[in-house]
Amino acid sequence: MNFEGLDPGLAEFSPAMHSTLDPVLDAHLNPSLLQNVDLDPEGVALEALPVQESVHIMEGVYSELHSVVAEVGVPVSVSHFDLHEEMLWVGSHGGHATSFFGPALERYSSFQVNGSDDIRQIQSLENGILFLTKNNLKYMARGGLIIFDYLLDECEDMHSLLLTDNSTLLIGGLQNHVLEIDLNTVQETQKYAVETPGVTIMRQTNRFFFCGHTSGKVSLRDLRSFKVEHEFDAFSGSLSDFDVHGNLLAACGFSSRLTGLACDRFLKVYDLRMMRAITPLQVHVDPAFLRFIPTYTSRLAIISQSGQCQFCEPTGLANPADIFHVNPVGPLLMTFDVSASKQALAFGDSEGCVHLWTDSPEPSFNPYSRETEFALPCLVDSLPPLDWSQDLLPLSLIPVPLTTDTLLSDWPAANSAPAPRRAPPVDAEILRTMKKVGFIGYAPNPRTRLRNQIPYRLKESDSEFDNFSQITESPIGREEEPHLHMVSKKYRKVTIKYSKLGLEDFDFKHYNKTLFAGLEPHIPNAYCNCMIQVLYFLEPVRCLIQNHLCQKEFCLACELGFLFHMLDLSRGDPCQGSNFLRAFRTIPEASALGLILADSDEASGKGSLARLIQRWNRFILTQLHQDMQELEVPQAYRGAGGSFCSSGDSIIGQLFSCEMENCSLCRCGSETVRASSTLLFTLSYPEDKSGKNYDFAHVLKRSICLEQNTQAWCDNCEKYQPTIQTRNIRHLPDILVINCEVNSSKEADFWRLQAEVAFKIAVKKYGGEIKSKEFTLADRKEPRSAEGLLCCSSMEELKNVWLPFSIRMQMTKNKGLDVCNWTDGDEMQWGPARAEEEHGVYVYDLMATVVHILDSRTGGSLVAHIKVGETYHQRKEGVTHQQWYLFNDFLIEPIDKYEAVQFDMDWKVPAILYYVKRNLNSRYNLNIKNRIEASVLLAEASLARKQRKTHATFIPLMLNEMPQVGDLVGLDAEFVTLNEEEAELRSDGTKSTIKPSQMSVARITCVRGQGPNEGIPFIDDYISTQEQVVDYLTQYSGIKPGDLDAKISSKHLTTLKSTYLKLRFLIDIGVKFVGHGLQKDFRVINLMVPKDQVLDTVYLFHMPRKRMISLRFLAWYFLDLKIQGETHDSIEDARTALQLYRKYLELSKNGTEPESFHKVLKGLYEKGRKMDWKVPEPESQTSPKSKAGLRQGNWVG
């Protein structure tokens, strides 16, 4: 499904993305509407409707003029003609508001009013628009800016509002009172009691307030006291609509019958002078809406939900000839409104479409409308360009607004006081050993500080918060700040400090002393690193993903499998998920869900990382499930939510899916049951504020077996009705994924309160046991001296802990679910978990927690606590045990298990929890098969349309040339720049790299290293890219604009995945790659190659603590070749590297004479210094190899 053209509000309304229970929409809705309608951002025209190009409209007769889409597939809940401007406002069931300008219905603005509730009434004011939802009144400007947001009590259920004057508003609903709101002070001024609850419609004349009740009554109330003056019992069932004009009141509704409620085709008409009913008016449609349209006479417009409209006089007989039909896209009309000028009628249907009917070709909505303000056109194109490279360019050319007010920079001196930082005191050891000569003192350096670095302490309390002081500070904000003492250093956002050598001299081992691989954070959208680690350490998921391989170019499952393979091969070195994130950015659903961040948003921490990673968690599970399904079911589910059609088609579904039974009970007694599945659950917290103790198992059960009230379509009532929706579980998943949804202070306070209550209970219940165990903590590395400190440390482990390490879940016979916390003591009491599984009892162990670190300096970060299993330790370290680790990008450290469940809500907030069934690995086949076959090296078609065989620069391998273990392959790669480097100049004039340039591989060449065709390339692939290239680096790469474009390129163009599979096959088969600077090549290509398979001429011809030598200089010095003249050619570079390796073997006698080769290198460096490492121009000087009489062992230069 392509979300690119849709309104962003649609993604926010999608029930599978937000709600834990999918609201039941109209069963008659056409699901193909979303795919067949294209939206125009200028004005969303519904081209699928059978509307003629030119509509002939007769004067005085209403007919359809325009139809547009407000939100595709989302029912329209209310429509309103603006009383001040020529605009039509529409609200949807998803809480989204859209405005249209003029009779052409050009889209003016569109914004979200409420994230969960529908918009129930709209009222236009002079300066903005009032929107009423269930328990919220919001006043917004016509462009979407919020003027005020007034929250009502959560128990309120409002349906109607009435503007009594310019600053007073009445709000009524299903409760037994009506509120009066002062719009100037935005405060409640009166609360009028209502004897008959359920005020859903309100009208006003110069004599009375008219209130329509759900019971079918209409009450007339005094304008000042709001007391009941008269009451009409209009219908025995319920009231649909009523309107007042002059001395007449007309109402429509439902009457009680033996079979239930039925739509009454008699309109009740009342004379307000006599206060009595007159003859009812029989109509020929089922009335749902009615309005007086007093143009020539007091006509009534009666509308049915099926689209029939009838005009008649309230005191006369209805004529069937006055009926016309509105053609809605959906089966039902949901709303109806009349403009103030009575020239236009607006209808909204259940498919999100709006229909405008008028009685003239050029109608006006108001008799006197003011001019509407539109956004100013962009003036940038009209300004002259400024060349910043010109030092003498006058800055006065920059247009600046003329102002006579005081500028912000003119800060008065009285408001500022100088606060210089005092110099730190001199070390006492220096003062003790100092010797004075005159007024100058000399002392030996005690070596207690780094050279030329004096840290300034802003506070005396220094960084004594934790014992992780050996980690160096991030370059962002190089001085300690007070608020950071709360966040432990190992949890702070880690960044890479770049030097002129890039990453080569950065000590990753300082941050990771394990053999597990971290992930680098500098790549765009690398906020998901922690979740990638969680999925990797799920053994069944890791094996499943690595066994997956398909032909889809941007397949997240394939790219994730390649990344997992790199994590397997790494021995503590960090990896990067550049290829995975590159594929992630191409998926339209990820963009529609807001998962792709701009660089500025990511750097500043804009938005909630906790919500972002929870949406990413739901998205990745659904996407992996879809990718697995496509192998067998090509037309599998393609949504982005948490529910899906069939979970049995993929192992992801078997691991994560939970089959559920959703029951919807209408107030009429009709019950609907449907089955569905979900990949994860979202915690739903109790509303209790009394401080009651809730254990985690209780909240989890409440979230899984959820019960809530919502508006849903009832087939029996044939309308939207309040329904009670309950969810029962049929089948438990093997991996239980929980989104914590701690997105506000309300949820955070709940976690904090429950942790405090749990700590008090634990101290009261197990206090004696904790003290008796204090002497078993001898394995701790921290020094302990006093028994009191030991006791405090033991008690500290239980602070901020509410989450259990294990939970026990059981399906009952009546389709219920029992959930309880599970401890080791429970296992001794009830027996092992494996024996319980035969009775439907399962024990889930906590495997991972993803945490949001709140850090105002860096914008926050995401880390993961992961319980690494025995199989991973066996492969990496040769031991069999389980251990909790902290994964903070490339920082990895073992931690105590209690630290994984301790959440200090001031800075450490839980986001995602992963529980796995005990003995999960024994249920699945954990064998990994290499799915990459030798056929990937054979000839393949080019993506370029203009590529011809005559342009071929390589000869593919034949079957008899397939490489074997130990074969040599010359390799070289060329790159282009996607993002420029970000750097800053320090005060001393040196440059500091903040963010390196983002490179993308553009060409990969592999040449044969042996055999009769040695030196002939068998791979020379140009890599097609969909991302914008900032710099082709033609001077260094040889890549020209157009070489990577499939439409105009004459090169052999392939996808990155195709070439990646070729290199992966060569690595897996065991070939040895020969090249120059291969470390950077493999890093950008995103490959992890074992060190014994890399022969890099950079290091072969290198002396310790000396500079690296370029390939061009080496080729001139040893081979008498002059390469890379005007530009670089990867075929030439790969061949040259192979020849240099042969020369190395020749000079070093295959590595048996290191001393003689050392003399050769010494001569090389002496020659390089003399030549300033530059290759001479032609005919100016020959290389040492061409000199006569030069012996093989005498390379003096």
Image (cartoon, grey):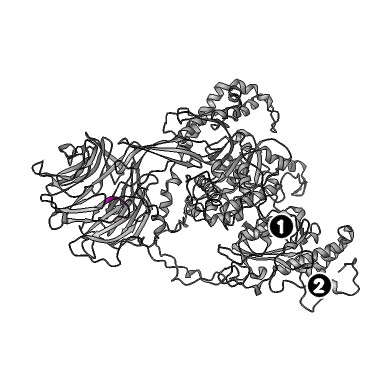
Label number found at residue 846? none
The quadrant of the image that shows the C terminus is: bottom right
Kind of element beneath mark 2: loop
- Which residue matches tag 1? 1066
Left or right: 1168, with 543 as reference point: right
Point out residue 762 in the picture as x, y percentages from the top left corner: 55, 25
Point out residue 785 in the picture as x, y percentages from the top left corner: 69, 27
- Which residue matches tag 2? 1120
Point out residue 827 in the picture as x, y percentages from the top left corner: 60, 25
**Residue lying furthest bottom in this view?**
1179
Q: Quick one: label 1, few (<14), some, or many (20+) residues within 10 Å? A: many
- Work out whether residue 435 or residue 353 is closer to the camera in this orientation and state it: 353
Sequence-wise, which precedes: disc 1 or disc 2? 1
**Residue 43 seen anywhere in this rendered image of the structure:** yes
Left or right: 221, with 545 as reference point: left
Q: Against 307, is 362 above or below?
A: below
Q: Amino acid at mark 1?
A: Leu
Point out residue 1173 in the picture as x, y percentages from the top left corner: 77, 68
Q: Quadrant of residue 543?
A: top right
Q: Quick one: label 2, few (<14), some, or many (20+) residues within 10 Å? A: some
- Work out whether residue 1144 or residue 486 is closer to the camera in this orientation and state it: 1144
Question: Which residues fall within the magenta stretch?
Answer: 326-335
Q: Is residue 484 magenta?
A: no
| Residue shown at the point (65%, 27%) measured from the top left | 790
Discs 1/2, front: 1
Q: Amino acid at mark 2?
A: Asp
Type of secondary structure dominating the magenta stretch? loop
**Residue 854 seen anywhere in this rendered image of the structure:** no
| Residue shown at the point (56%, 44%) measured from the top left | 652
Left or right: 356, with 310 as reference point: right
The span from disc 1 to disc 2 (Cα, nearest Å) is 31 Å
Kind of element beneath mark 1: helix
